[in-house]
């Protein structure tokens, strides 16, 4: 391993805590901060009290600051708000934004940090909690190639690094990936509704889809796991998925790219958030399709 780094990790939630744990296991000096004291306490219960950061310590002396936060608005507040850490960071420090963020805001953050002698790359992830725990996330990384070279030994402890291009491109790719994922989920749910109403066994349907051309991430990793048992507990909230689809569609709008299917996808997922509430698991969107059709997929 390269020389251990002093890493300040901001965001110790369901994804952030296991990701920070992977960095500790890799031999780095990692301390965490979260607006929820309970999350920090839970992390420290496993890794020791020295793993905690106070708000006053945040950013001071860190080689690398990693953030995985709800959205770019929160990132902006952490960096540049009334108690922002940007001006506390030492020259040469590297900020890695692993939030599912807005590319345009990321570019602005990069310019503001550069003026302070601090670098930024974006590195959002895909793979959900199980892959955060075992360090096998897909990490979509945008920014200067030399900065990614510098960050890769750290990032590779959390997953596989794919370089997507310029700063902000990782955030763009993450949003577009989730747009495709959400579209695949909805059409798969509709197929299950149509098929089970006709009389097909939902388990058989999923098996056939997974051995045929209809296979996608949802048929493989969500239908039998969360939909057919009706547990709807994958661990990723609906409002976060809607945010990512909205980012993808904002990219389409800014690029003057017609995206009617994408817009329909956003409308349906947004409608589900309005009907079900923002904090339900994203797999519960199946209930929207069931409500519209008047048919419930049988529980297995």
Image (cartoon, grey):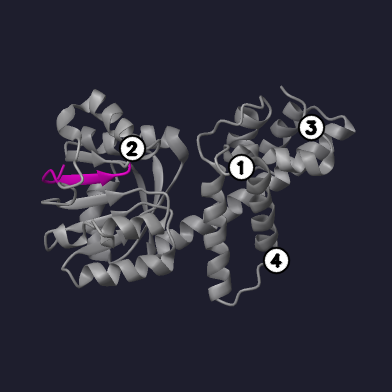
Q: CA distance from mark 2 to mark 1?
A: 22 Å
The magenta stretch spans residue 6: yes
Looking at marks 3 and 1 on the same chain, the residue that comes earlier in the sequence is marked by 1
The answer to whether residue 97 is seen in the rendering is: yes
Looking at marks 4 and 1 on the same chain, the residue that comes earlier in the sequence is marked by 4
Q: Residue at x 59, y 77 (%)?
A: 256
Dot in front, 2 or 4? 2
Residue 142 left/right relative to 253: left
Q: Residue under circle 3?
A: 296
- Range covered by the magenta-colored residues: 1-11
Q: Residue under circle 1?
A: 277
Q: Residue under circle 2?
A: 36
Q: Residue at x 21, y 27 (%)?
A: 47
Q: CA distance from mark 4 to mark 1?
A: 25 Å
Looking at marks 3 and 2 on the same chain, the residue that comes earlier in the sequence is marked by 2
Q: CA distance from mark 3 to mark 2?
A: 38 Å
Q: CA distance from mark 3 to mark 1?
A: 19 Å
Q: Nearer the viewer, residue 118 or 176?
A: 118
Q: Nearer the viewer, residue 234 or 164?
A: 234
Q: Is residue 233 above or below residue 143?
A: above
Residue 55 image position (x, y, % from top left): 21, 46
Report helix, strand or loop for mark 2: loop
Q: Is residue 29 above or below residue 247?
A: above
Q: Residue under circle 4?
A: 260
């Amino acid at each position: 391993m390269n020389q251990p780094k002093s890493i300040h990790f901001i965001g110790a939630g369901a994804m952030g805590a296991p990701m920070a744990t992977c960095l500790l296991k890799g031999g780095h000096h990692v301390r965490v901060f979260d607006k929820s004291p309970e999350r920090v306490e839970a992390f420290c219960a496993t890794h020791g009290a020295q793993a905690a950061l106070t708000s006053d310590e945040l950013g001071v002396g860190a080689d690398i600051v990693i953030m995985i936060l709800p959205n770019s608005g929160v990132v902006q507040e952490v960096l540049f708000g009334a108690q922002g850490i940007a001006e506390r960071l030492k020259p040469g420090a590297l900020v890695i934004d692993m939030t599912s963020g807005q590319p345009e805001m990321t570019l602005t953050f990069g310019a503001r940090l550069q003026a302070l002698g601090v670098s930024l790359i974006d590195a959002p992830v895909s793979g959900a909690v199980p892959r955060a725990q075992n360090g096998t996330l897909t990490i979509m990384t945008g920014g200067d190639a030399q900065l990614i070279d510098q960050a890769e030994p750290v990032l590779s402890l959390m997953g596989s690094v794919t370089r997507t291009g310029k700063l902000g491109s990782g955030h763009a790719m993450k949003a577009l990936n989730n747009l495709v994922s959400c579209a695949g989920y909805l059409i798969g749910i509709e197929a299950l509704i149509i098929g089970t109403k006709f009389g097909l066994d939902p388990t058989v349907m999923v098996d056939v889809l997974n051995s045929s051309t209809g296979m996608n991430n949802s048929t493989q990793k969500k239908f039998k796991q969360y939909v057919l048992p009706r547990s709807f507990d994958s661990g990723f909230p609906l409002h976060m998925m809607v945010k990512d689809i909205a980012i993808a569609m904002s990219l389409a709008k800014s690029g003057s790219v017609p995206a009617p299917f994408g817009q329909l996808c956003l409308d349906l997922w947004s409608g589900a958030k309005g009907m079900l509430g923002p904090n339900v698991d994203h797999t519960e969107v199946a209930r929207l399709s069931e409500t519209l059709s008047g048919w419930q997929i049988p529980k297995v």
